[in-house]
């Protein structure tokens, strides 16, 4: 699909701002010019006298000069001759007229500065200049809610640039208050406006992708459609709370669609089978350096009670049924707040909470969820309690009420989007983790902590080919390069680098956590976890022949051209001498 040329919006905004200034200041400027012109003309017509007392009128240039420093309150007082009474009367009148004219013009200017359209034009002009100055690749974040804030913070920590577009002024202002390391341009406007989306960076050559995380599915769908039609080369990640909208997004080639509700059920299913897998997945999708999350025990099997409005209740019950659980659904219409002992009795009795092993509060209202948790704990203190926490700011409240497992949609979205942006190969690894079982995941977590430390490791992909690994070409062709040897430390090959291979991709086949005995072939891709210093060391092995020779063969060879020549000469001479000795 060809890329549709995008319009130049910057010059249009500049022209619009200038036009707005002239339109609002047109009358004040005309009044000032008229007063000044009449003042100059009248002063040149007033009768005066020269130094000898002879009648003389002031020329237009002298009148213009005098009125210029008088009207601007500079007041040089430079007069070739004393003024006559008519001249003084005229100057007095023009002084008061100019004061009135200036007061009116300044008032109009102050009013213009407070005008929302003018301020918006200025903001857009500054935004346009900021975006144009960006030279490195950046992400366009549409919406600046909780999920986008978490994602923006992670991107900033990773040194990646981003641009924000949101339709709420408080959120746009909050971008500057969040104090990111790099400049983060933010624009106020509706993302459904194609011109604004283009201005926000869609038309910029350095735009590396679009992330639509607004709370409105229709807006996210519109952004996905617009990006697909105008910039089909850009990846799009969009949030959707509806399966129907998600399908429409995929129809327009949105690479990834994130549904937090769907992820809620997926997370519960993983916790039911392999808590260590859940711990590993959350850890690897966090920002580098994040601490290892808490590992849950396996969730109880038995009868679960799910309390939520229609959509959430049906989605969760479907996921839990798939795990073979007995599920009772109690519907809360619209997720509204319930109150009173009668409602409490209804929830407890309708769900038979007293003999359930787990209770799930899953409405879109945190106040309702807190009330539901409290009612369930009164009816059955031993039940495992799960809650949907819609706002991160309410974390302390959910902890205080005694929630055993809570899911924050913003965190789930931020983790998944970050993983897809930082390393797409990771998203081919994570879905396979729960299938390996709890013991496999637990062992991999222990290996990562032992090799890389307790913080989230850096993840990167390498490809075994001539472009990325020129120093390994011959060994790959011979078929004798083992993964264990490649991951030796260039400083001392008796030690290993702090790198853990997560997956091996070979001709469409996937191998999870390949062993050190794996023989590498040309074209293999590896997803690795480790630290940046170890990544740099591995890069040296892959690109520098002397380093690769030492790491893989144990031989140290000179790195400079001169030393290699001298070494070759010495080796040749030494061999000749040994031959002569044998002949003698």
Image (spheres, rainbow, N blue to C red):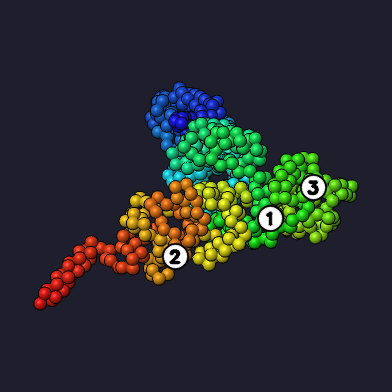
Kind of element beneath mark 2: loop
Q: Residues within 10 Å of mark 1 (few under 14, many from 20)?
A: some
In the rendered view, would you say 551 is above or below 367? below
Q: Give x and y (percent) for residue 334.
A: 77, 40
Upstream in sequence: badge 2 or badge 3: 3
Marks 3 and 1, how far apart at CA: 17 Å
Q: Nearer the viewer, residue 268 or 93?
A: 268
Q: Which mark is residue 272?
A: 1
Q: Which mark is residue 497?
A: 2
Upstream in sequence: badge 3 or badge 1: 1
Q: In the rendered view, does 55 fall on the left or right side of 102?
A: left
Q: Nearer the viewer, residue 324 or 455?
A: 324
In the rendered view, would you say 176 is above or below 449? above
Q: Residues within 10 Å of mark 3 (few under 14, many from 20)?
A: some
Q: Which mark is residue 328?
A: 3
Residue name at image x 79 percent, y 45 percent: 329
Marks 2 and 3, how far apart at CA: 51 Å
Q: Give x and y (percent) for residue 559.
A: 28, 63
- Furthest-left residue in view? 584
Kind of element beneath mark 1: helix
Quadrant of res 395: bottom right
């Amino acid at each position: 699909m060809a890329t549709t040329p995008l319009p130049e919006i910057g010059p249009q905004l500049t022209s619009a701002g200038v036009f707005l200034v002239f339109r609002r200041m047109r009358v004040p400027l005309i009044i000032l010019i008229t007063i000044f012109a009449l003042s100059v003309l009248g002063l040149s017509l007033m009768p005066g006298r020269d130094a000898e007392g002879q009648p003389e009128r002031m020329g237009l240039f002298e009148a213009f000069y005098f009125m210029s420093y008088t009207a601007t309150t500079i007041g040089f007082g430079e007069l070739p001759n004393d003024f006559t009474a008519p001249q003084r009367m005229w100057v007095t009148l023009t002084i008061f007229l100019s004061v009135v004219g200036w007061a009116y013009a300044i008032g109009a200017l102050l009013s213009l500065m407070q005008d929302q359209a003018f301020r918006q034009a200025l903001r857009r002009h500054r935004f346009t200049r900021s975006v144009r100055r960006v030279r490195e690749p950046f992400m366009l974040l549409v919406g600046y809610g909780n999920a986008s804030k978490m994602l923006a913070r992670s991107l900033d920590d990773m040194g990646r640039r981003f641009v924000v577009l949101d339709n709420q002024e408080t959120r746009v202002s909050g971008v500057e208050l969040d104090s990111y390391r790099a400049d983060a341009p933010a624009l106020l406007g509706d993302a459904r406006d194609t011109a604004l989306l283009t201005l926000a960076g869609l038309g910029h050559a350095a735009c590396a992708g679009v992330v639509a995380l607004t709370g409105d599915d229709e807006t996210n769908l519109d952004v996905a459609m617009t990006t697909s039609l105008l910039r089909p080369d850009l990846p799009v990640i969009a949030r959707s709370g509806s399966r129907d909208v998600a399908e429409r997004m995929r129809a327009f080639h949105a690479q990834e669609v994130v549904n937090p509700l769907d992820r809620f059920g997926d997370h519960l299913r993983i916790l039911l089978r392999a808590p260590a897998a859940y711990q590993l997945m959350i850890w690897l999708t966090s920002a580098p350096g994040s601490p290892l999350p808490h590992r849950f025990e396996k969730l109880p099997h038995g009868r679960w009670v799910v309390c939520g409005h229609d959509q959430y209740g049906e989605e969760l019950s479907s996921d839990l049924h798939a795990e073979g659980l007995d599920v009772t659904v109690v519907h809360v219409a619209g997720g509204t707040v319930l109150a009173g002992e009668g409602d409490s009795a209804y929830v407890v009795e309708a769900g038979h909470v007293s003999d359930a092993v787990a209770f799930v509060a899953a409405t879109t209202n945190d106040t309702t969820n807190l009330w539901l948790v409290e009612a369930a704990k009164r009816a059955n203190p031993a039940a495992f309690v799960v809650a949907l926490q819609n706002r991160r700011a309410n974390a302390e409240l959910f902890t205080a009420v005694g929630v055993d497992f809570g899911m924050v949609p913003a965190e789930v979205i931020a983790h998944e989007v970050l993983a897809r942006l930082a390393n797409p190969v990771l998203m081919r690894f994570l879905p396979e983790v729960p299938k390996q079982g709890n013991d496999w995941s637990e062992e991999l977590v222990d290996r990562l902590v032992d090799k890389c430390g307790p913080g989230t490791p850096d993840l990167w992909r390498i490809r075994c080919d001539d472009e990325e690994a020129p120093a390994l070409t011959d060994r790959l062709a011979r078929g004798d390069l083992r993964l264990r040897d490649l991951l030796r430390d260039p400083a001392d090959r008796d030690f290993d680098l702090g790198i853990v291979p997560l997956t091996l991709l070979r001709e469409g086949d996937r191998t999870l956590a390949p062993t050190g005995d794996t023989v590498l072939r040309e074209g293999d891709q590896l997803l690795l976890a480790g630290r940046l210093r170890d990544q740099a060391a591995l890069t040296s092995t892959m690109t520098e022949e002397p380093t690769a020779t030492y790491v893989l063969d144990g031989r140290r060879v000179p790195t400079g051209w001169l030393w290699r020549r001298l070494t070759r000469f010495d080796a040749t001479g030494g061999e000749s001498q040994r031959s002569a000795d044998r002949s003698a």
